[in-house]
Image (cartoon, coloured by chain):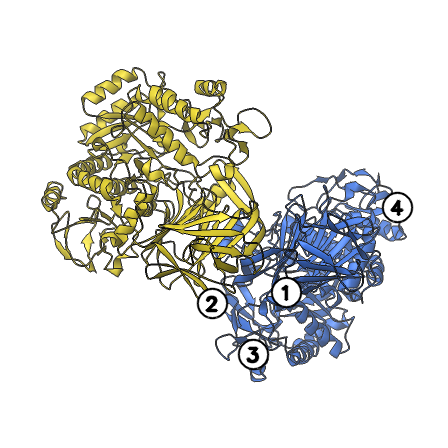
Chain colours: A blue, B yellow
Amino acid sequence: MSAPSAAAPRLHWSAEGVTLWLADRMILRHAADRPALFVGRGAARVRMDRGNFALADRLEERIALRHATPLQEGGDGAGLLLAPAPGAAPLLRVRLEADGLALEPLDPALNRFWLRLVAEPGERLWGGGEQMSYVDMAGRRFPFWTSEPGIGRDKASPVTFEADREGGAGGDYWTTNYPQPTLLSSRRYALHVETSAYSCFDFTDPTGHEIEAWAIPARIRLAAAPRFAGLVTILSDWFGRPPRLPRWAYEGAIIGLKDGAASFARLETILAAGAAVSGLWCEDWVGVRQTSFGRRLFWDWRANAARYPDLPARIAALAARGIRFLGYVNPYLAVDGALYGEAQAAGLLALRLDADAPYHVDFGEFEAAIVDFTRPEAIDWFAERVIGRELLDAGLSGWMADFGEYLPVDLRLADGSDPLLAHNRWPLLWAEVNRRGIAGRGRTGDALFFMRAGFSGLSGLCPLLWAGDQLVDFSRHDGIGTVVRAALSAGLVGNAYHHGDLGGYTSLYGVRRTPELLMRWSELAAFTPVMRSHEGNRPEENLQLDQDATVLAHFARMSRVHAALAPYVARLCEEAVATGLPLQRPLFLDHEDDPACWGIETAYGYGRDLIVAPVLEAGMARARPYLPAGRCWIHLWTGACHAGGAAADVPAPLGAPPVFYAEDSPFAPLFGAIGRDFALA
Amino acid sequence: MSAPSAAAPRLHWSAEGVTLWLADRMILRHAADRPALFVGRGAARVRMDRGNFALADRLEERIALRHATPLQEGGDGAGLLLAPAPGAAPLLRVRLEADGLALEPLDPALNRFWLRLVAEPGERLWGGGEQMSYVDMAGRRFPFWTSEPGIGRDKASPVTFEADREGGAGGDYWTTNYPQPTLLSSRRYALHVETSAYSCFDFTDPTGHEIEAWAIPARIRLAAAPRFAGLVTILSDWFGRPPRLPRWAYEGAIIGLKDGAASFARLETILAAGAAVSGLWCEDWVGVRQTSFGRRLFWDWRANAARYPDLPARIAALAARGIRFLGYVNPYLAVDGALYGEAQAAGLLALRLDADAPYHVDFGEFEAAIVDFTRPEAIDWFAERVIGRELLDAGLSGWMADFGEYLPVDLRLADGSDPLLAHNRWPLLWAEVNRRGIAGRGRTGDALFFMRAGFSGLSGLCPLLWAGDQLVDFSRHDGIGTVVRAALSAGLVGNAYHHGDLGGYTSLYGVRRTPELLMRWSELAAFTPVMRSHEGNRPEENLQLDQDATVLAHFARMSRVHAALAPYVARLCEEAVATGLPLQRPLFLDHEDDPACWGIETAYGYGRDLIVAPVLEAGMARARPYLPAGRCWIHLWTGACHAGGAAADVPAPLGAPPVFYAEDSPFAPLFGAIGRDFALA
């Protein structure tokens, strides 16, 4: 599935040492007194508390591979043999390939790897998977280990302080459900570390970037291209072209309610307000249990007739009106559910180290087992028995495929693999379960699942990301704005479709939804591929769409804007399938010759022809978004023209988020009609 | 000054490798597949904000020295030559000495060192300098870098969270003004790392303790002894026998007031309440400046006639009544003071890296320069010009010799030394300045200075420690109890005399003194060598001794108890000078055959014959302190007898802290009289 890189890596040997080049870009500079490669040994120390991890390394050795010689086979350009010193046994073989470096440790005890990359002043470094806090990673350090995203994600925030006190749940700027050791440099090259081990990018040293991995990676993939968009297509080739997003998913909003049978009546209220609705999402379709965190779901993945009586008839009635029904599933089985017993009897559960008994994970006032997806029959069982029979056969058209980040490292897996290496792969196995379950019922391209957990390769397996569990606020590192950064970073490494929980999710430590937040989030969600609302973790304590007439009318109007954009979005989906370009994209992707676009992380191109600068702060009445040079941009709500290459100054009241379309877009008539139809009074 | 160790280290070579022994204790076990020694290279990254440091290592190499061979010279027992592998160039020479290992790096680029010590289950590890949170360091990691102690010192405390937000000032369990890389193991051996570089003891791995240093230490000192007390004497030999404490220092309380001339009238109130007073300590004798932290001193070390008119006459009048006058000094010079100009003109100030201009340190709303004590004439100048002429000649009998922890690492020192290596030595240079200033006036053994900053070797230079800046509360990691732990840990490595700020110091973020705290602290201070009160950083917002009749009466009574103990304390001081044993000591030091004593950190022996179990929590009415086996202990306030080897159950109202004396003590008549004279009504 890999396209050849536009520029294969080359070595250049000199008296000082050896350098590695991609076309005219020096990537590595290695000399005996300034080595670029290191190997070593260490022992990981891992603590997990409900998906929040603390990892530390007990480092035994870090060996500078000072002595580089050309590989005997194939001439000077074939690769490197690396040793600590002349005469010492070589420890690493590096073979050049068309799109990178194949690495081979020559001592099986080695389990640590470091690589120093050439750094340039002012270099920007994007990627890292789905990064919530920073799209440009320059100047910071980013560990890659799938985990809970954290609550507050800011050590200076009182919310994070409180969450940290309760099990280290506060997170930090780099904690993410979907990490990926891939970077895209403003030097117009991309690098990917091919390992599922814990790894880390350290961009804090201006004299060189340092990559660390707790394994010798199989390969360091490299690619260069003249334009950023070309690089993104290469990354999409590497990690898998996204499946086509089902059309129903963007032709109306998906209403999230988890109120049991009352959800249907509440949906009618929302429909009556004029909302364009294509789906009803009831994550509590499996029943609930109450915990101190909030009302949680019953993790036994079967329709719960007590909470949802007559569900088949309900689903059929909705279908007749063009509304899909969606549910929820995750890869764990509550120990007090029926599926747990089935899976245990079939020997499909991951085991404890100290007993031939299923490993139980504490999920906060209840425990669940882990279906061991390293066993092929466990994937088959979950795909057929759960996804097929319980979800699709029950009439679901989609679901949140939650979690995937919790694989502990102190358990036994059926294939004998090291949990430290399986941990980051787990989201991929989980995506494969869902993908295969849908394929088994012939519903590929129609049924939809969305995930928050991810790792390198997710883009080819999972049709839709969601940005995890934001706080229900405007906070810098865990509020509404992180959804935008998440979309942009994930999109750059191959994930074309992204969305978030409209209204946010986490309400704890006094953080509560305001009407303004719900409305701003409605505006943002309307200009993303999927507009799905969420009641949050504590629905009773937080404002809901159907509880405030102003909020509801605003949402309904935005859902109609969203639906009206469907023809344009369909075109973007075609482009995504063809090129891997994401629907939401940093402005520099289509406007890379305008350097003013490079640092913008809170506005985005929605495709090439729309600029969306959502309001991500409270109390904003006007906005001054920068518009890319070289085109003329029309303000969606007023029709006013703004020349690119400068900031526009526009009103941004509730209901009119700063959105602009290119005058020369083939969709200009559609955009013009939307602007007229939905102009504020 | 070094006494020969009771057991010189020996090597034992075998087919597996080599082991190092102290008598029958295996200290190191080294084999090719399990090396005990490592060297490497790294670059320190240091951030400082007002004495709060964040240190990180950019580690380049960590080389396992797998290959050990006997030194050619002197036979198998003489030492080790260590190399990464057979045939590789050796990198470290280790030569056995009577009391340790002399280390010699064979590559000048090496600047990192690690040593793995044999660990035993249940082993206790005391020492580390002055540790506020844990006397027993087992199971935790302790960096050694003199710094501000931190505010709250507990990442789970809201106070620490607030302080961390303001410049990273919150600290942690290991932050201390006085670190020292010395350990005393329950295996009855001691180890000291002879380097002033940043170092660290890591006791978190049950398979071995790891010592790290950011330099190759000159030596690893080792000693074993059959009894703990013998080890403490050896450590005192190593680091310097404490000078004799002046008798006046413990014959009454030292009253801390910083109210300008009003201090004298307030002292009269305290005297009128019946307090036994031997000194008046006015740290504001140099004048004040107001900052948001509180009222701070004017750092130009001369009597301030505006704030203290007629000071010589005042001092003389106090002296006539047997009351000494004490002041304050620190090693920095405010840039707006007169001494700054003198020192700058004489070229005595540390310089910036980027200019031939004095380096200015931000101390929070004002700046100060650093007198460069690596220049001998700077030590002379400060000793004579400041300590001699401004302090002693003005009539001071003592002072707080504050600070010493702030030496930044980005400045130029006169002797060309690396600030990273000078940083930890700075408190020693500062102590030497004070010592020499006093000696220059012939006042050794009479004039007294007390320091919070320290490092290996302080005990021979500074006659008295004080425990730094506690919060004015009972909190676990920064409240009253930390003074006890500080005394016990510092005492074990040779510091015989210790005390704290009676009432605590830091009042921030809503932490305020209660009457109960002041009274409990009076009780604690009465049973320490020096009973010195402090108004704290924000006197106006906090209760003072003379503001509450009950508190004052209680203090006065405790000061008389303190004074009454003087004959016993004098005897303890003699013992300290003879043996190095600290006045306040962990119970196991005199009762090591009772293992129940080993884990006790909040009660102490005050000498061999008193057990002090101060009340360190709010709201306590009774206490159940453990009493060492083998003696009979008499409750000071009631005369009730308690057999050792069990916990006593005693009333502990305000005014009667749990204190016991040994029935067989030669001082039993004195203690009995005190108990009778001061019995509660």
Are the residues under badges 1 and 2 in a single subunit? no
Chain name for mark 2 = B
Can you identify the residue that label 3 sits on? A340
What's the residue type where badge 4 is placed? Glu
Q: Is residue B559 left or right of residue B187?
A: left
Check the image and name the residue furthest to the bottom. Answer: A345
Tell which of A90 and A406 is nearer to you: A90
Q: Are marks 1 and 2 in contact (CB under 8 Å)?
A: no
Whole-angstrom CA distance, mark 4 to mark 2, is 79 Å
What's the residue type where badge 3 is placed? Tyr
Whole-angstrom CA distance, mark 3 to mark 1, is 24 Å
Whole-angstrom CA distance, mark 3 to mark 2, is 50 Å
Which label number is shown at residue A663? Answer: 4
Q: Nearer the viewer, mark 4 or mark 2?
A: 2
Are the residues under badges 4 and 3 in a single subunit? yes
Are the residues under badges 3 and 2 in a single subunit? no
Nearer-N-terminus badge (3/1): 3
Describe the element under mark 3 as helix, strand or loop: helix
Q: Give residue A343's position: percent from left, percent from top.
A: 58, 81
Q: Give residue B131's position: percent from left, percent from top.
A: 37, 47
What's the residue type where badge 1 is placed? Asn
Can you identify the residue that label 2 sits on? B16
